[in-house]
Image (cartoon, grey):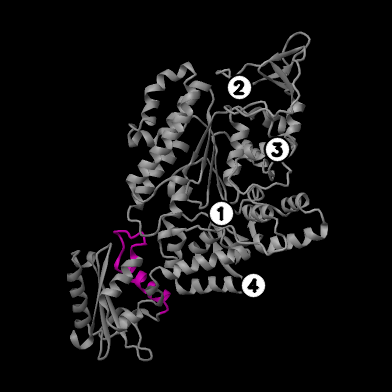
Amino acid sequence: MVRIPENIRKVKRPKNTVVTPPSKDGRYPVRIKEIDSDGKQKNGATIGYIYGEMFIPSGEITEHFVHHRSSRFSTSAMGFRELLENGFAYVDKTSLIAEILDSDPRSVHFFTRPTRFGKTLNLDMLDCFFNIETAGILDYFYGMKITDSPYYTEYRRYKGSFPVIRLNMGSIDASNADAVNRSLGNMVSDLFRRKRQRLSEFPEFDSYRFWFDRFIDGTASEQDISTSIMDLSSCIFSCYGKRAIILIDEYDSFIQTMGGDNSGRDSVLGILSRFMTSTLKHNDNLEYGVVTGVLRLSQTGMISGLNNTVIHDIFDERTGDCFGYTNDDLDDLLDRTIPEESDRVSVKAAIKKAYDGYVFGGREIYNPRSVNMYLSEGTFGHPPRAYWDQQRHNAFLDDMLNRAPRWILNEIAALMDTDGFKVRKEVDPSVSYWDLNDDDFEGTHLYSILVTTGYLRAEVVERGIRTYICDISLPNEEVRESYRDLIRRAEGIRAEYRTGPMPMIARKDSAGVTEYFNFYLARNSIRDSWSHDDCKKWMLNRLLDSGIEANAEAESGNGFCDILIPKKDRMPRVCIEITTSAEAGTDNLDLLVAEGFRKIRDRRYAGPGDIVMSVGWNRKYLKAEMIDHRDL
């Protein structure tokens, strides 16, 4: 229960009023409403609250909370209520409430924004508005944007009226299937433990008691855990007679810490997909769902066939100003913090250079956490510091950059080092989990991820059905510093591969070339149905991306060699022949390699001085062997 400030004036309950029904447990304050002279209750505004034996007028309560325009800035992860109760600044994002309530019941809203852009705080604000368990005497929303809406009379009916289920999936361990099941079980156990005390006061809970305790004592099965939130929603409906609002934070954080070499990713994703699908798709007792994350992986990745989804990505104009600070937000904060107008101009210019540059829904957006940190330090005579990416290690992005072709890294380096430099690219905000494992020869996937995660700014030039043509640039100086660390890590991972396979081919390092291609092959969604042509195309593109001039189906000898690297400078010509298990009828890599050498010899593909490479390919792996022409 929230505390009552000491300075609130308490008076006797006015006459001609009636106490509205209390909560079932009787522990929470009940409201007072006016009644007509004939004793019938009006539908008018609440005029106060009962607390113990005292009546507290609404005006006395709400006036206490007209201090969210404070000039004190929190540098820790405070929640919505905690910020207001302790007198810290809060930048009003309550218009997000209307976005939820204006949608159809049972809608699931997915909000994707970079880290540190206020997603958790917004979920906490929604929790405070909707949650029936914390509905109390204090009106935290007095004077905020949501109350200025012409539809607030309707919105107010939903305030403090719903049971809320709150989940934070940021602690999910995605290292393997067992770890995912274990961490999901721990998360569900903590949730059920928090809910048990309140629900146990309802008579309807008795029929759920034994089932409920299995989650708390850790004896629930994996199947039980996968449907636990759906079943909890059913229990809540039996007790409250109301469907639940489900708030899920950081639903995709496990992907950001799972590198491309995670061999168990399919099973990990399957477990989480079943959990999320039962929670949000098959849940008949869901009123609204709100899910936050960084990457938009919902429909083709973690959740399949969800037909009640409302996507709010960085291109969504309706919610462009709901995450991060707008220019108006910053001006308001500076008005509170810096009294002299001349000083405000110089400080805003410094903040703009360091923390501005994001574009969400067509709105210029500042990084809110970095602005708060800078204003809280008050060192306005010094250049702003970099706060955003401190001590973050995103293995997911590391792996993406490590696999990126050289030309993309060169473009990123130009963006990082050249002020005002832009590149025009296609951005796909709906890149799926599976897409991230495929070859990305145009750079669409990588640029889309870098835009979505906040490492690049995207200004829309042309809108397509699913994708956007955007001018891509670096957002600000803070991100420039983050890039230096990100690129440095990417360069440090398998740095020997950055030069491509040509040095290994030149010295006929068969083991090195085999390892090189399998390194990248393991990061692709290889299908058993890949044909010989598919394999040839993949290898050709890998060679081209590493800067090697190569041709497919090049005429040579008595036929056409699969891939031919022409002689250049002191580098000899290289003949490459691929033999797949599908065409040779065996998965034995040594036999496949031998068959390749036979084809090269019989068809006279190679000549004096050439290097001959035979590649055996058995769906998941390949083996490359190289010899001189004279050794055929």
> In this picture, which residue range is highlighted in magenta?
521-547
Mark found first going from the N terminus, 2 or 3? 2
Q: Is residue 158 left or right of residue 484?
A: right
Mark found first going from the N terminus, 4 or 3? 3
Q: Is residue 320 visible?
A: yes
Mark found first going from the N terminus, 4 or 1? 1
Q: Is residue 247 above or below residue 459?
A: above
Question: Marks 2 and 4: in contact by CB < 8 Å?
Answer: no
Q: Secondary structure at mark 2?
A: loop
Question: Which residue is painted at 54% across and 25% down in the image?
Answer: 242
Q: CA distance from mark 1 to mark 3?
A: 25 Å
Which mark, by number, is residue 146? 3
Amino acid type assigned to the residue bearing label 1 in the image: Pro
Amino acid type assigned to the residue bearing label 2 in the image: Tyr
Mark found first going from the N terminus, 4 or 2? 2
Seen from the viewer's position, the closer of residues 70 and 567 is 70
Residue 22 picture location, percent across and down: 61, 17
Residue 327 picture location, percent across and down: 72, 55
Query: Is 539 a magenta residue?
Result: yes
Residue labelled with disc 1: 114
Amino acid type assigned to the residue bearing label 3 in the image: Ile
Q: Secondary structure at mark 3?
A: helix
Seen from the viewer's position, the closer of residues 435 and 488 is 488
Residue labelled with disc 4: 419
Q: Secondary structure at mark 4?
A: loop
Q: CA distance from mark 4 to mark 1?
A: 23 Å
Which mark, by number, is residue 28? 2
Mark found first going from the N terminus, 1 or 3? 1
Q: Secondary structure at mark 1?
A: loop
Quadrant of the snapshot with the C terminus: bottom left
